[in-house]
Structures are given as C-alpha cells and as structure tokens.
Image (cartoon, rainbow, N blue to C red):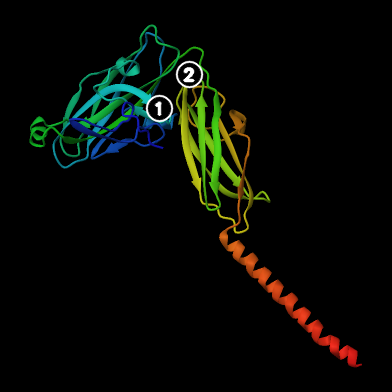
Amino acid sequence: MISRSPKLSFFRLCKVAAVAAVIGAALPNPVQAASIGSRPANPDPNNPRTQSIFIYNLDRGGSKTDQIVISNGSNEQTDIEVYPVDGVVTVTGDFTCRQQVEPKKDAGNWVKMSKNEVSLAPGASTKVDFTVNVPDKADVGEHNACLVVQRKTDPDTAKQTGGIQLQTRQAIRMAITIPGDIHRDISIDKFTATGTNGQQSYDIAIKNSGNVSADVDVRLKVRDMIGNVVYENGGEYAAIADEVRQFRYESKLESFWGGKYKAELSISYNKKAGEWGVSKNSGDLTIKSAEPIELFFWPTPAVWGVIAGGLLILVLVIWRLIAAAKRRKPRLRRR
C-alpha cells in the first residue's frame, strides 16, 4: 500500500522533483537507482541484512565510524550528494525517509559525514566515511535514520527549465539500538475479510508495541467447506518499533455452487528481541493467530440457469409420465 501523506512520503515535487528508490528495509541487496548505487561498505558476514542496512548497537554517549560505498554506473562524470535524514514511518507503517529540508529530530541528527559530495567518473566508486554519535540521554530502543544519495542538481539546468528539475534519490536505512529494556510485542491489530463470489479482499494490520523492530512472517489461508486450502498468501514484513503496519491481500475465488469459506491469519516472529529475520525453528518463534473469519459465497448466476433447466426437465418428465398413464387407462377398461 502507498502512503499519500505529503509529509512522510519519499516522493515530493517542489523546485526539484525527487523520485525515491526503495529503502533497504527488507531487501538483502545494495540500493541502485538511475545509475547511482550505494551500499554499506563493511557488512557483518554473520548478518546478511547488513548488506543493505546499517545496523548498530550503541550505548548512550557511544560512537561508531563506518563507510558507505557510492558508485556511478552512468557513462558520464557525475556529481553526487550524500547526507543523513531521519527515518520515519508512513501512515500504513512502511519505512521511508524525511526530506533534506526537514529538521532532523532523531538519529539523522546523530550522523556526521566526512564529506557531503563526491564527483565520480563513469563506472567509478568511492567510500565516504561517517560517524554516528549517540547523545548521552538517548532513549532506550531503536532509532532510525537514512543515508540519502542523489545526483547534485545543476542550477543552470534548473533555470532553463523554469526551476523544475527531475532528480533521482535513494537511501539506505540505518537502525541504531540503544541497549536497556529491549522488548518486542507484535499483535494482530486488524483482520477483516470481505467480498463476493469471484472477488475478495483481506485487510490486515500488525502492531509492534515494543521498542525495536521485528521481522514478522504473515500467513493468510482460505479453506473451502471440506478444509482444503484454496488460497494462500503472505511474506515477511518489517514491523517498526511502536508502529502499526497495514496491508491488503486480494483473491479471486469463485465457487460455482457457492458455500462457506474460512479465512485464517497467523503471524510469527523471533522471541528474542533484537534479532533480525524469522527463524526456521518453530521453538525460537512466538506464533499468534486471529479469530477465523467465515465467508459466504452465493452461487454463481449460472447455477440458477442449471436449476431452472433441471426444473424444466423435471416438469417435462412428469408431464410425459402423466400423459403415458392416461393413454394406458382406456386399454385397461376394454379388457
């Protein structure tokens, strides 16, 4: 689902129109957009998620120096800007980033770049140092920032186009956890199923009441009257700390004769707070289920035609039986 909030959206048209790439909240690959690429320079070999997300556990007052790799995949010399902003959540619970012009109130303000601009030849890449300085009074739990990479705007080109210039932006999420009373508690905040024979929708919301993010495995199953699974959907979703994540599934189940169906929803996530991903071992997981929802489908219009045809055939059969019986009666009298 797409947020339409102009304040939180990563897409905004102003004097420079910005088009954002997907934040690396759920992708294991480096971010690439319009020939500009970026990735963490020093991923943890024991945590694949660090290939696309900066993940740190830092004490209050602590600091961390790291690097971001910026690459130019175009065929021309390119000036590229890099800067930190706060990470935020849209109204549907998706992770995104604030605009450069917006004040930094959280972890985006903790990041200091060694430089804010690089000029790269075609096919070249470079590393840019940065330092994270955690305030002494930072709240326990997770704080999110983004490192944004974009082509530097050309003032001359902007003047020629009346101040409007298309610009490509992309970002890498940075998740900083301050140790202390770390906890996560994921619940199913909403589960509804509506629709008719041939078109159904399932609205789901999961709430993270904890202070660190959690990867949540969501599973939706729809069963027919005899218990067979006729529709299944789901996946792993990042539930940001103290936020609600909303999404919708749609199906096109059609039953000729209609009948009752049952929609079932379950979620699972790692019991241990601070772990990324969802374990394959059920013993490591917290599993929760919603109350199943019954769906009733009316028969398709074709059924009524079948019933009408069947009734017509039945009437014809009865009529012929009656007619045959009447023809036999005179013969019986003559005998």
Residue at far right of view: 335
Amino acid type at circle 1 is: Asp
Task: In the rendered view, tell whether residue 191 sits above or below residue 274.
Answer: below
Query: Closer to the camera, 283 or 335?
Result: 335
Determine the secondary structure under disc 1: loop
Residue 286 horizontal/vertical position (percent): 59, 28
Q: Quadrant where the C terminus lies?
A: bottom right
Whether residue 182 sits left or right of residue 30 in the image: it is: right
- Mark nearest the camera among 1 and 2 is 2
Residue 39 in view here: no
Q: Residue 326 carries which label?
A: none
Residue 138 horizontal/vertical position (percent): 40, 10
Determine the secondary structure under disc 2: loop
> Label 1: how many residues lie within 10 Å, few (<14), some (14-19) or many (20+)?
few
> Label 2: how many residues lie within 10 Å, few (<14), some (14-19) or many (20+)?
many
Q: In which quarter of the image is residue 317?
A: bottom right
Task: In the rendered view, tell whether residue 220 sits above or below residue 198.
Answer: above
What residue is shown at x 65% (from left), y 65% (from top)? 307
Q: In which quarter of the image is residue 105?
A: top left
Q: Quadrant of residue 266?
A: top right
Residue 58 horizontal/vertical position (percent): 40, 15
Q: Tag 2 or tag 1, which sits nearer the N-term?
A: 1
| Residue underneath mark 1 | 44
Query: Closer to the camera, 126 or 148?
Result: 148
Residue 318 horizontal/vertical position (percent): 75, 75
Residue 8 in view here: yes
Q: Marks 1 and 2, how far apart in space?
A: 23 Å
Query: Closer to the camera, 228 or 92?
Result: 92
Whether residue 319 sits left or right of residue 153 in the image: it is: right
Q: Quadrant where the N terminus lies?
A: top left
| Residue underneath mark 2 | 211
Amino acid type at circle 2 is: Asn
